[in-house]
Image (tube, coloured by chain):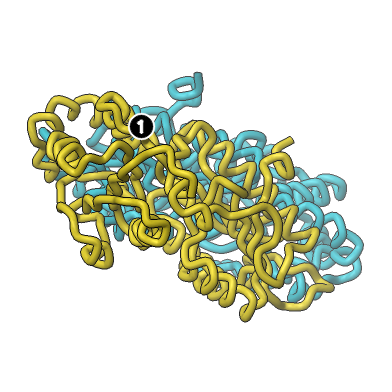
Chain colours: A cyan, B yellow
Amino acid sequence: MERRWNKLGILAGGGNLPARVAEGCAAAGAPFAMIRLSGYADEATARFGGEECGLGELGRIVRVLKNEDCDAVVMAGTVRRPNFAALKPDWRGAALLPKVVAAARRGDGALLDVLVETFEAEGFLVIGAEEVSSGLAVPQGPLGRHAPAEADLRDAAKAAAIVAALGQFDVGQGAVVCNGFVLAIEAAEGTDRMLARCAELPASMRGLEPDEAEGPRGVLLKRPKPGQELRVDLPTIGPETVRRALAAGLSGIAVEAGSALLVDKDRAVELADEGGLFLYGFLPAEFDG
Amino acid sequence: MERRWNKLGILAGGGNLPARVAEGCAAAGAPFAMIRLSGYADEATARFGGEECGLGELGRIVRVLKNEDCDAVVMAGTVRRPNFAALKPDWRGAALLPKVVAAARRGDGALLDVLVETFEAEGFLVIGAEEVSSGLAVPQGPLGRHAPAEADLRDAAKAAAIVAALGQFDVGQGAVVCNGFVLAIEAAEGTDRMLARCAELPASMRGLEPDEAEGPRGVLLKRPKPGQELRVDLPTIGPETVRRALAAGLSGIAVEAGSALLVDKDRAVELADEGGLFLYGFLPAEFDG
């Protein structure tokens, strides 16, 4: 990786992305300090040491970053919708609280924007997880052995338009479309639960055509919301997404190339290849009119 | 009811709406014939007699309507996404099948439009369920004892905008918004399952503010898709919707006045009153800018 900073603070939310980012740093010999967000960060991040801070303890987070001589910050992993009543803000956090609460009313995206602003005001460089671990960003085209068919690309285009239309409401990054029929739209439940409910839909909802054999059909599409702060909360997929897409009987997963992350790539591609599922990185120009 | 027809054919899909429509006719002394759609119509409709037809047997459906001397048709109840492979179309149905399949690719709304066209081409008057049983249409304002607060109306306005934005994709008629945060958007799963998953969301996702007591919060909003054929597939709520909204911890349900149906109104209002839930009929002008 080409570094624009000396030492990176990793603010770790949920999921396995923070551990991947730390591994990316370690592999490149790039110094880092982990800050685990209480109630969000995965147990797996504990092996990288560092402090555990509450999301409301913004003053303390900034202090830890400075004590560790960090000059850059990456927010990695999911930090969904905090319970403000349980935030226990420190002085700095409390000063920001009205702004954070107002932002949260507009959705998760707005909430993260406030954190980015705060770190930048303190002189930190805020970077995206894909910059630390460039192997995480999904490239354009098919990954693995399978590629989308014409009908899959039509479904993906419809799903792409839906996520784009919802962007103004700061909701979701995903939708599932099968034969032109919208099976599911992601909101607060997240991608995994959305796929779980697709698996429960009766087969008749897939809308197979009279001359069509039963078989995998339908596309999960994930892309950033329009106007989303791309350095935080990028749409992320991994082996678990592939497993659930297979269980839902889908034919593939499409994500916006360069703006979505694939964690545990080798394992994800292996599972997709075995299951006959395509993984496809699309360019916005392919679908946006 | 003021009737513009002599005898009504009730094409019965799923749910309890068809039985309510038949009861409405019976109460008004208006003649009707029931046609139950195989695989969709509820057992409860069997007591009204009449034929059972497949959705693909359009020729037979038209024949039955003519034999029964019907001059009007109402499509009542849900007919979601048929499995075309299992349709077993008759001659008439088969002739329409390519058109139906193409329409279905665009969604349920387009599919129902084809049926409306077919009945109208045969000279039948196609009417809406609310015309038969005017007590079903939700009036403007609060129903029952509870009314929405300011914050509820803000949530309802956001949900109304989301359903409107999704209309072009022929998807969903419902969304749940809580404190400005979009908890769920309805697609193929239907309103009941959408509410069930809201009930499963962790409390922290409700986004309570620091000074706020825990309590019911969030609004289920249902309205027709823009451009939806209003005589079929109107958004419908009933006691079960109220029960599920209460279980999901919501503060109320808002539906578009005059364009949504409330079945078993007395029971629904009673349950809402007991549970502290508001039922509110909104006018589009209240929310659409």
Residue closest to the eye, B210 or A113: B210
For residue A231, say whether it is visible. Answer: no
> Identity of the amino acid at label 1?
Asp
Identity of the residue drawn at 34% across and 45% down: B75
Locate residue B209 relative to residue A192 in the image: left or right.
right
Question: x and y percent of residue A135 in the render?
Answer: 46, 41
Question: What subunit carries mark 1?
Answer: B
Identity of the residue drawn at 72% across and 39% down: B285
- Label 1: which residue? B113
Q: Toward which corner of the image does residue A22 lie, by quadrant? A: bottom right
Q: Toward which corner of the image does residue A66 lie, by quadrant? A: bottom right
Identity of the residue drawn at 57% across and 74% down: B246
Locate residue A43 relative to residue A35 in the image: left or right.
left
Give the vertical position of A152 relative to B171 (above or below): above
Identity of the residue drawn at 81% across and 71% down: B210
Residue closest to the eye, A17 or B212: B212
